[in-house]
Image (cartoon, rainbow, N blue to C red):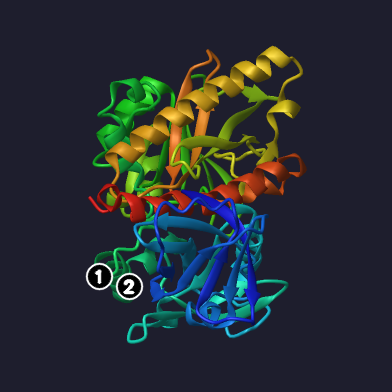
Amino acid sequence: MKKLYSIDVINDCTNTIYLPADAAIPRKLNRVAFGTIKVNASITVQKFGGNVVRISQDLFLALKIPPTSPVLHVFFDDEVLYFGPLVGIFTSGFSAVEVRPIGDRTIIFSKLLAVQNTAGVTAFLFGAQHINWEKGTINGLFYHDGWIRFEVPFPDVIYDRIPNRRIEGLPKIKKVKERLQQEYLIPWYNPGFFNKLDIYERLLQEDSIADFLPETLPFTSFSVVERMLSNYGHIYIKPKNGSLGKGIYQVIYNKKDANYYTRFKEPSGEKRLLKFDTLEKLVQHITAKTDISGLLVQQGIHLMRSEKKPIDFRVHTNKNKQGIWEVTAIAAKIAGTGSATTHMNSGGIVKSIDELFDLDNEKELLKEKLNGSALRISKTLEKYTEGTIGEIGFDIGIDRKGRVWLFEANSKPGRSIFKHSSLKKDDLLTRRMSLEYAIYLYEQSIKKPEDIFK
């Protein structure tokens, strides 16, 4: 059983918890837990109503419940009353500046933590340096009308928000993750970044998903580029582990003038279009700057267009508090003038589906295609990927014949689409659900730990 209650701290008793009349306790409870702290307590059901749990101040302090936790879920199992979940958001890049404790990402995390009461969780930020292994506590960073520090027990669930692959690969980061999962059996979700080629090869194993996949191969030789360009007319050469559209080259063969073109963006941000009279020269230009072992070659798709510019779609999926996938946001991304991609940092613009189409039946058909494909791919990725995934951001295209194509899946999706005014509700929903999934993991870790730690 679980239910969301307000927490009321009382001073006229000690070591006591009073539950409201509707708390159907299956048996006598004599212990209470918050995070990894578990203590003995006198737990009594009173006749008062309302969704309020009253807890003596000494217990509130002993459990190290932060003052920012006015509401919590209450779980019963065996003889233990569980308050939670306490969700630790593991990240890096902390700053000594009090008003910007995570540097440029401070506003992102303040918005995430702002929805914790709505989600029914207690959430905080921490890094490797904030853990006290001897005491089993963390000096967590909380947000409540400003940033505060508070010592809490190790959390019930950990949400991975490490910002990039380089930091993820650091030995100290790996060690923290290993210890908290293996020694303390704490569920950990959204670990790691997807490798584009690895994801492609895994999804190919599922026949029902393979039709969504443009041909994608490692850049092993010039002949791979030559053959794919001959087959498709245009292709993309991109990093296996890239993000934000960086390092992507569109390669086009123009039959009219028999020349080869590549469109890309310089590190400075300047968009370039270069012409070559042979494919060899074009490929040499790309490989002179990049190690080919880190590249892949992907089939180009003739996408549907808006005002003669290609469109693809960002689709967010999240697992809800029942552990079921839902589509939480859809936005159209329209390529900027002269851009090889639809990324906003390359001049792309975001529109809602309602802005893109005038006819209701067109909108509904498109939403149905994007919803159905994103949910199917989410379930398949979960099946073939190690670790626990709670959210995915997909870049999905629809060609001029209406066929759906998956270009990328991102385990830590960016949030630039939510700057669009019509996506504010979706922004709120995705943030809330990214925390609500912790409720499911917490309950499973109590009731069915074998399903979490198998």
**Residue at position x 37%, y 86% in the image:** 135
**Residue at position x 63%, y 80% in the image:** 148
The residue pinned by badge 1 equals 183
Q: What is the quadrant of residue 52 in the picture?
A: bottom right
Count of numbered circles on the image: 2
Q: Amino acid at mark 2?
A: Val
Give the mark, 1 or 2, whose residue is nearer the N terminus. 2
Q: Nearer the viewer, residue 62 or 452?
A: 62
Helix, strand or loop under label 1 = loop
Q: Which labelled disc corresponds to residue 176?
A: 2
Q: Nearer the viewer, residue 297 or 73?
A: 73
Give residue 396's position: percent from left, percent from top.
Answer: 50, 31
Give residue 443's position: percent from left, percent from top.
Answer: 41, 52
Pointer 1 local density, CA inside 10 Å: few below 14, some 14–19, many at least 20: few
Relative to 344, is 203 above or below?
above
Task: Indicate left or right for 373 with 77 as reference.
Answer: right
Q: Is residue 437 visible?
A: no
Task: Indicate left or right for 24 with 384 as reference.
Answer: right
Task: Indicate left or right for 339 with 383 as reference.
Answer: right
**Residue at position x 57%, y 66% in the image:** 18
Which mark is in front, 1 or 2?
1
